[in-house]
Structure formats: C-alpha cells, structure tokens
Image (cartoon, helix red, strand yellow):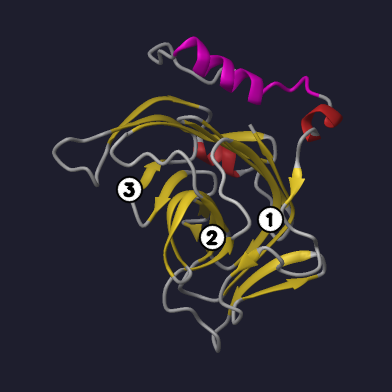
Amino acid sequence: MQIFAKKLVVTAGLALTICVFLNPGLSAQEADDGFVSLFNGQDLAGWEGDERFWRVDSGAIVGETTKDNPTKKNTFLVYRRDSVDDFELRFSYRVRGGNSGIQYRSELLSKWVVKGLQADFEDQMHEGKDKFSGMFFEENGRMFMGQRGDVIFVRTNPKNLKKPVIDKVATVGEPAELERVIKRDDWNDYTVIASGQVFIHIINGHVMSIGIDEDLANFRKSGILAWQLHAGDPLKIEMKNIRLRKL
C-alpha cells in the first residue's frame, strides 16, 4: 500500500509504526492478542451519560435523539473506568440520520461535554456523499484538521494557538472512492490507532486518514474515550464489539 507521496519525510520510527499497524499479514489470533472488551453487551457498566439518550439494545450501545426527545447540544457517553494514551481500538457501528464519532485522548469539560480528538462516522449525506467519516477532527478544539483521504502534519501556529498549521503531505486515496467502502443501513468496522503523535483511522479495512500531531501547544498524551451524540435532526447510533488493546 503506497500511503506517502515523495514529499513526505518521516523518521524511521514513524514509518515502522505505520507499517506494523497496517500489516495485512497478521493472523486473526495475533491481531486479537491483548484486546480487552469495554462493553459487556448487557448494560452500560463503566459508561456514564445522560440517561435520556443512552441505552443498551440487542447487544449494542444505542444513542438516540428523536423529534420529541432532542438534545440542544452535543452530548457524550463517557468511559469512566480508565483513560488511555497509546492504543488500538476496534468496534462496529451503525448510524442513521446524522453525525457522530468516538472521542479519544479527550477531557471532560463539564457534565457530558467533551473536548478532544474524534474519529468521525455519519449517515449525513452532503450532495449525495458522506463527507466526514474517517476524518481527523478535534471536538471543542482545533476542529477540522484532516479530511478523509488526508495524511497531515499538525503544527503549532505561534500567532494563533487555537488554529494550528495544517500541512497535507500525501493521500491514502480519493475521498469519494474511500466513501464507497462504507455501508449504509448496515454495520461497519472501525479501527482507531493512537501511537505517540501518530493517529490512524480505518473503516472496513481501508485507511481513511493519518494525522501526525506536532502541535505541542494542544497535543494531549492521554485522555478519556467517549461516544458523541450530535445535536440536530433525529439521530440513532449503535456500537458493539468494542475492544481496546493498549500499546
């Protein structure tokens, strides 16, 4: 898989990290070594959020807003048993009606309000296309950093610490082509990898984006996990097979 363009220069350590994580030769048994389930399939033990929106149904965590039960702002289901730094997270998701994502290396700002990195997924079609699934984003922070398909460096902007310098150095594919591997009205498999300053988002076996965060003014070494339920039109998200391996 050719990920990097010629203009991308990386250290040997960074290159090795990416090659190991994207090695298709790993057996299923090797890939699952060290994974711990974060969800028991029966209740929300270990997770905390607004009970009006979160429940367990048919072995999946469900977050849902309706016309009669909306949320005025983004609300989150937070994993409270542990914070994580370097990890590989795997889960399956299904979404209907809008935009969501999994927060990582994040912090709780107030009750059910989270700031931090996000691996996005959605069923919110923009001109007939899913625009955001797989992108590199920071909720309540630096916001849009890398779009689907991007390989980016994020660097500190000394003139405005809230708006980093984004250097797109390569692509992992055309956004429209990558969008075609995402299933509608069905389950998708998501992998999120965080290793040091390198972040990789993968959906259904396809790398969607790679972010290398050198913005030390905003970089977080560790933080919480949380599911986002976006404000707006009625939305339903489902997540299952949630498991994490610390690196």
Quarter of the figure that contains the N terminus: top right
User: Which disc is residue 198 wearing?
Assistant: none
Closer to the camera, 50 or 67?
50
Picture coordinates of residue 188, whole percent (x, y): 70, 50
* Residue type indicated by callout 1: Tyr
Residue 137 position, x and y percent, is: 43, 47
Which quadrant is home to the C terminus? top right
- Residue situated in front as seen by the camera: 103 or 137: 103
Marks 2/3: CA distance?
A: 17 Å
Specify the segment rendered in magenta.
11-26
Q: CA distance from mark 1 to mark 3?
A: 25 Å
Using the image, determine if residue 104 lies above or below residue 46. above
User: Label 2 sits on what residue type?
Assistant: Ser
Check the image and report above or below for 164 versus 236.
above
Left or right: 153 in relation to 51: left
Residue 204 or residue 112, whichever sits in front:
112
Measuring from the top left, give residue 155's x and y in whole percent: 30, 31
Above or below residue 221? Residue 239 is below
In the image, which disc is placed on residue 93?
1
Residue 191: which quarter of the image? top right
Q: Residues within 10 Å of mark 2 (few under 14, many from 20)?
A: many
Q: CA distance from mark 2 to mark 1?
A: 10 Å
Residues tagged 2 and 1 counted as in contact (Cβ below 8 A): yes
Task: Tell me residue 115's x, y (percent).
Answer: 41, 56
Q: Which residue is mark 2?
A: 100
Q: Secondary structure at mark 1?
A: strand
Question: Label 3: which residue?
Answer: 142
For the stretch drawn in magenta, what is the main secondary structure? helix
Task: Name the residue located 54 percent from the left edge and 49 percent from the top edge.
Answer: 133
Residue 81 can be seen in this image: yes
Residue depicted at x 64% and y 65%: 47
Q: Give residue 26's quadrant in the image.
A: top right
